[in-house]
Image: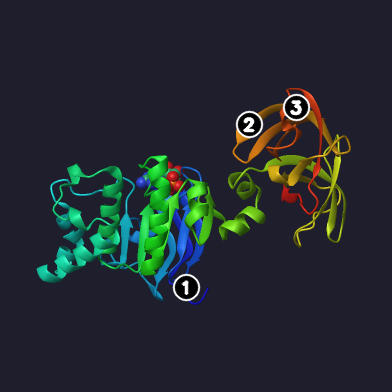
Amino acid sequence: MSEPLLTLEAVRKVFPGGVVGLDDIDLAIGSGEFLSLLGPSGCGKTTTLRVIAGFETPTSGRVILDGRDIAPLRAYDRPVNTVFQDYALFPHMNVEENIGFGLSLRRVAPAERRKRVMAALELVGLPEKAAARVGELSGGQRQRIALARAMVCEPRVLLLDEPLSALDAHLREQMQLELKRLQTELGTTFVMVTHDQTEAMSISDRIVVMNRGRIEQVASPAVLYDQPQTRFVAGFIGTMNLLPARVAAASAGEVQLDFGAFQIVTPVEDVRLPAAGSEVTAGIRPEDLVLSGVNGAIKGVASSIAFHGRSLRLRVEAAGGLSIAVDIPRQGDSKSLGHTEPVSLSLRPGALCRIFER
Ligand SMILES: Nc1ncnc2c1ncn2[C@@H]1O[C@H](COP(=O)(O)OP(=O)(O)O)[C@@H](O)[C@H]1O
Ligand SMILES: [Mg+2]
């Protein structure tokens, strides 16, 4: 990233009553980036957005935009706009008035205002709705109008708080693509809150995974999936078998993990070579395991099979009391896998176990 557009430095937010909303957040956001804040309910996503927008004052720390501390600026004076979860459109105004509201506050002349409102409507694909009442619009159309209203003032940063959560699954997927297209077209920096990992993964340049007011990891979708840095991220992004193990032996590039009833040798992905004898959590993706005749290291019985489109998700109760998810191709002998069928699993060649602190 070149010079960041927006930086949060050691931002902490303690609410009256002592609830820690944000616990020391450091984050640098690049110009033109589509960044998502992802995490479970209550982890501090909305608070982060509100601190950037100026609706919330940090207890300590700094928010820097374009190289200057924006703490003294009130929300209205910040070059930032927010799209709220419930759209927050004004019901007594028509579409044009809704979109033009921020421009009137900024005393933009009517002719110029109308021009910009129409351009914004064009951008979200609803040029014919200028005179419509909010009540006449569908959920998807309201969402587009809320977007147009937030973008018409040409903010440096557009903040979006769960912008698509009120839409049904099909429309939601369509709007995700629209959001991405808009962001690319405008080159505006988007910071979007979502608790939906699929949504975050499909449209973000980078994702900030948050947990309990802290940042666990900031990375591209692919890096988050392939190289989760913490046990929390490993368990939150995609499906990961998280199994307790003991490090039986560790040498450069290779670790032998003892799961009690079986052992697995895995390459280690990074410099975080665990100490021999330490208790760890091993993370294995379901797609990194294969059924392997009778020779696999992991012996168990199949307890259930679920349909997952191109693959089947098999649950295996392994020796030693571990329950393990395995993805297997639909073709082949999967039909014969009834309940309590003995199976044997091994790590797919080239795959690895991730190793986390217990
Ligand atoms: N105004 C407030 N007063 C007290 N606690 C708050 C307030 N706003 C948020 N919190 C608390 O701060 C934490 C983070 O909240 P929030 O940022 O809304 O989470 P998220 O958007 O990730 O679900 C939660 O524990 C929440 O209850
Ligand atoms: Mg929230």
Quarter of the image where ligand 1 sits: top left
Label 3: how many residues lie within 10 Å, few (<14), some (14-19) or many (20+)? few
Label total for image: 3
On the image, numbered disc 2 is attached to which residue? 306
Task: Say which residue label 3 marks.
Answer: 336
Disc 3 + disc 1, Cβ < 8 Å: no
Question: Which residue is denoted by mark 1 in the rendering?
Answer: 4
In percent of width and height, residue 308 lies at 60, 37
Q: Secondary structure at mark 2?
A: strand
Amino acid carrying label 1: it is: Pro
Q: Is residue 278 above or below residue 58?
A: above
Between disc 3 and disc 1, the foreground one is 3
Vertical placement of 241 versus 251: above or below? above
Position of 115 compared to 318: left or right?
left
* Three-letter code, disc 2: Ala
* 294 up-or-down from 219: above or below: above
Closer to the N terminus: mark 3 or mark 1?
Answer: 1
Q: Which badge, 1 or 2, is on the more N-terminal residue?
A: 1
Q: Where does residue 257 sit, x and y in percent of width and height?
A: 84, 46
